[in-house]
C-alpha cells in the first residue's frame, strides 16, 4: 500500500474524478486546508481519509499529510484533476525498486492546460534548482514519490509554496538520487489558485526566493 497526500482547498469539482482514478494499492489522505465548498465532507463520503489542517499553506497541508502517513512510500499530487492518479505506479516503481530516492512527475501539458506565464516561471524555477543541485530538471511538479521516513528526516521547514523546491534542494544536499518521468498535464477543474494566475505564479517565485536564501 502507498498513501497519496492530496492537499485540498475548494476542490469539490475535481475530487470525484481524482479519487475515482486512484489505482489499486494507493490510498488517499485528503488534507483539507480550509475549504468552504464542502471538499472535506465530500472526500470522506467517497471513502478518503480526511485530515483537517487549519494552518493555511500548500506546505502546511503537505506536511500534515506526511505526518499522518504510515506507509513506507508516500506520494504527493494536486487534487484539481490536472494530474492523472493512474500515472503514480510508474513513479512509485522507481523508488520501490531501489532505482531512485525521489521521483518527480515532469508535466507535459495538453493544449491550453498550462498558461504561458506559469510555464515560463516554472522553467526558470526548475533551471535554478537544477543548477544548484546538479540534477537536470525540467519541472518541479507536484506529483512525486519518496520514502516517508526519509522525507521526514529532511527537516523541511517551508509551509507555503516553497515546499516543493525545498524538498528537492534538501534531497540533493542529502545525496538522494533524483529522477523525473514525464506525466500528462491536463486542464484543471475549478478555479486555479496558483499556476493559472499571474498573482499565484508571482507568489510561488517569491516563496522560492525565500527558500533559496
Image (tube, rainbow, N blue to C red):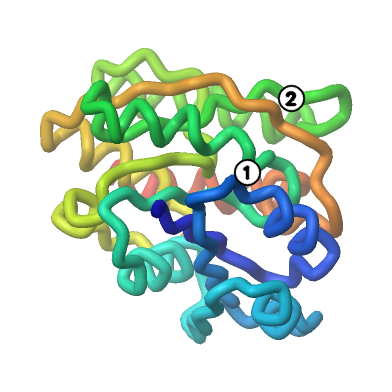
Q: Please report the residue visible at 67 percent of the width from the left and 52 percent of the height from the top.
A: 194
Above or below for 81 versus 43: above
Q: Quick one: label 1 or label 2, which is nearer the N terminus?
A: 1
Q: Secondary structure at mark 2?
A: strand
Instruction: Describe residue 13's horizontal placement relative to residue 3 as left or right.
Output: right
Q: Farthest residue in the top direction?
A: 136
Q: Secondary structure at mark 1?
A: helix
Q: Farthest residue in the front direction?
A: 24
What x and y, as percent, mark residue 81?
75, 48
Q: Using the image, tell me which numbered label, if any, was put on residue 85.
A: 1
What x and y, as percent, mark residue 73?
32, 49
Badge nearest the viewer, 1 or 2:
1
**Residue count near mark 1 (Cα–Cα under 10 Å), binned few <14, some 14–19, many ≥20:** many
Instruction: Describe residue 144's horizontal placement relative to residue 182 as left or right.
Output: left
**Residue count near mark 2 (Cα–Cα under 10 Å), binned few <14, some 14–19, many ≥20:** some
What x and y, as percent, mark residue 91?
44, 31
For this rendering, which residue is in front, 116 or 14? 14
Q: Are marks 1 and 2 in contact (CB under 8 Å)?
A: no
Q: Using the image, tell me which numbered label, if any, was put on residue 109.
A: 2
Q: CA distance from mark 1 to mark 2?
A: 15 Å
What x and y, as percent, mark residue 173?
15, 34
For this rendering, which residue is in front, 8 or 24? 24
Q: Using the image, tell me which numbered label, if any, was put on residue 72.
A: none
- Count of residue discs: 2
Above or below for 144 versus 126: below
Q: Please report the residue visible at 35 percent of the width from the left and 22 percent of the height from the top.
A: 179
Q: Does residue 104 appear anywhere in the picture?
A: yes
For this rendering, which residue is in front, 134 or 200? 134
Q: Does residue 207 appear anywhere in the picture?
A: no
Amino acid at each position: 500500500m502507498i498513501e497519496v497526500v492530496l492537499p485540498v482547498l475548494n476542490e469539490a469539482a475535481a475530487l470525484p474524478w481524482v479519487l475515482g482514478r486512484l489505482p489499486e494499492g494507493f490510498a488517499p489522505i485528503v488534507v483539507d486546508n480550509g475549504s468552504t465548498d464542502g471538499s472535506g465532507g465530500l472526500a470522506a463520503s467517497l471513502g478518503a481519509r480526511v485530515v483537517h489542517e487549519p494552518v493555511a499553506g500548500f506546505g502546511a497541508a503537505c506536511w500534515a499529510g506526511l505526518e499522518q502517513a504510515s506507509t513506507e512510500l508516500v506520494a504527493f499530487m494536486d487534487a484539481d484533476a490536472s494530474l492523472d492518479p493512474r500515472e503514480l505506479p510508474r513513479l512509485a516503481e522507481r523508488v520501490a525498486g531501489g532505482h531512485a530516492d525521489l521521483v518527480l512527475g515532469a508535466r507535459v501539458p495538453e493544449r491550453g492546460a498550462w498558461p504561458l506565464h506559469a510555464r515560463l516561471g516554472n522553467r526558470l524555477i526548475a533551471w535554478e534548482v537544477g543548477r544548484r543541485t546538479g540534477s537536470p530538471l525540467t519541472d518541479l511538479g507536484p506529483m512525486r514519490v519518496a520514502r516517508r521516513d526519509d522525507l521526514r528526516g529532511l527537516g523541511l521547514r517551508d509551509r507555503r509554496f516553497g515546499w516543493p523546491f525545498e524538498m528537492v534542494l534538501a534531497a540533493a544536499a542529502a545525496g538522494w538520487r533524483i529522477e523525473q518521468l514525464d506525466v500528462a498535464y491536463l486542464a484543471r477543474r475549478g478555479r486555479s489558485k496558483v499556476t493559472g494566475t499571474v498573482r499565484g505564479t508571482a507568489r510561488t517565485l517569491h516563496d522560492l526566493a525565500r527558500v533559496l536564501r
